[in-house]
Image: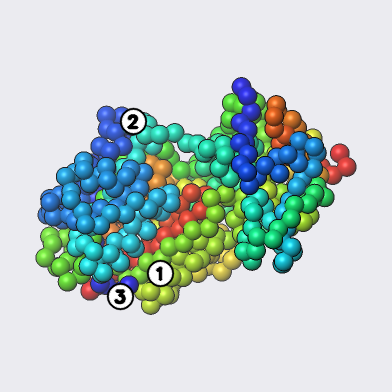
Amino acid sequence: MDRTLPQPTPETQHFWDGCKVGELRLQRCTACRESYFPPRPFCPACGSRAVEIYPASGKATLYSFVINHRPRPDMGAEPHSIAVVALAEGPRMMTNIVGCPQTPEALQLDMPLEVTFETFGAIALPFFKPAGA
Amino acid sequence: MKPRSIAVVGAAETTRLGRIPDMSVIGLHADAALNALADAGLTAKDIDGVATAGESPVAIAHYLGITPTWADGTAVGGCSFMLHVRHAAAAINEGLCKTVLITHGESGRSRVGSGGFGRAPSSLMGQFEMPFGVTSPPTMFTIPVMRYLKARGYTEEDLATVAVIQREWAALNPRASFKDPITVDDVLNSPMIAWPFRMLMCCLVTDGGGALILTSADRAKDFPQKPVYILGTGESVETPMVSQMEDFTSSRAFRVSGRKAFDEAGISPADVDHLMIYDAFAHLPLYGLEDLGFCKPGEAAGFIRDRNTAPGGVLPLNTNGGGLSYMHSGMYGMYALQESVRQMRGIAPAQAPGAKIAVSHGVGGMFAASGTVIFGNES
């Protein structure tokens, strides 16, 4: 079964284009310097439309997670993580932790992570793996 | 609103709860509505305001034969009915209508005449959450919990204890789906759904409905049932994406809604005799106790473990058995409200003796929205 994929909109296209070329693109406000996610063409902190797109470091820490023991058909048959990571730049995003066992022992809160991308046809999804793994 | 200016004069659930494969969603709405009308000694012709979620208020009004001068289709998930109570109170006080019917019906288990769970792939949830395998509430509502447990020093056993004590309440309720006693070990050994959540930490999935009828307090004494007055209400919304909630250890919507309701009622948590906190999952009563001010952050698990919320405790909580053991059709808020009204009427199966003030606190979506209603039984 094909993986459930996002359908980009004009306001989010830059993010998904970035994933295709291996870049995690965030936005920040040029007025108040706040970085934010998910994408939108204005700053949620101050309302300014003067925002810019920039490549994030790809560094993050594990903020919270579950291990889904009843995977959706497109996610395979084995238990897998659904996680929220705290990006080094501040915003948090949902993702999957890959490159390590999908167990409570291997998934420790606050562990350092780095972004990695996997391509599914026209879309690349941002996943995170243990830093240096 | 002015406290005690509005009263509940009709309240009922569907004739049956649980597994009802012979009724559709709108049929469940209507069954609950007809029961509530009978409870109030009214017919549909007496109703001039309609509010509902899950169905359109247009569909409900037409189906029941109501010609409303006010309609509210606020749909923010399971607490929508708390918001309907709040909006109805304002509408009645403003003179937009006199007698409001709020209905809920959901074929959560049998799925007769109901849609599926899903989000458009172009929505923000569709783009930034669905691709990572979230399925439904068990993999979404649970996302903040590992962070919460670590921040508070709570354990899996603390989550399990919530379910164990609610089962004690359910045992006292003949209409509860699950009544057999369970232990912490039973909960921890039940099938893993989404770590750290076992099946018995997750709500039931059942069919059912409920309805409420509200009018002004000056008319309320003319109805057959003991009026239940509204002392205060609150509402708020935060985010459609659980991954973007401001603080994983506290719900902003809970705090804002709760504060508004308590301020309006002019009471504090110490004045509350009976409490309902929407428990789609075992962590919600912990968040609710802290965010509404009943417990300091970090003290909610101990408060429950020490049996303060159990039968015989100082603060009876989720006395119908809750979403974990009583019933949960999908939008459970209506059943929390029904139990609050029963407690204020003094007719609940597990009645809190002498209770005068009851709080019903709801959640919508995955910490997306919240509504709070404070009831009293003295005019």
Residue A104 in view, yes or no: no
Kind of residue at badge 1? Ala
Q: Chain under label 2? A: B
The disc label shown at residue B261, or none: 1
Q: Secondary structure at mark 3?
A: loop
Q: Quadrant of residue B230?
A: bottom left
Number of dots carrying numbers: 3
Q: Which residue is mark 3?
A: B2
Outermost bottom residue: B266
Q: Chain under label 1? A: B
**Percent x, y for residue B268?**
43, 75
Label 2 neighbour load within 10 Å: few <14, some 14-19, many 20+:
some
Kind of residue at badge 3? Lys
Relative to the observer, which residue lies in front, B120 or B55?
A: B120
Q: Which residue is mark 2?
A: B112
Residue at horizontal 61%, vertical 22%?
A1
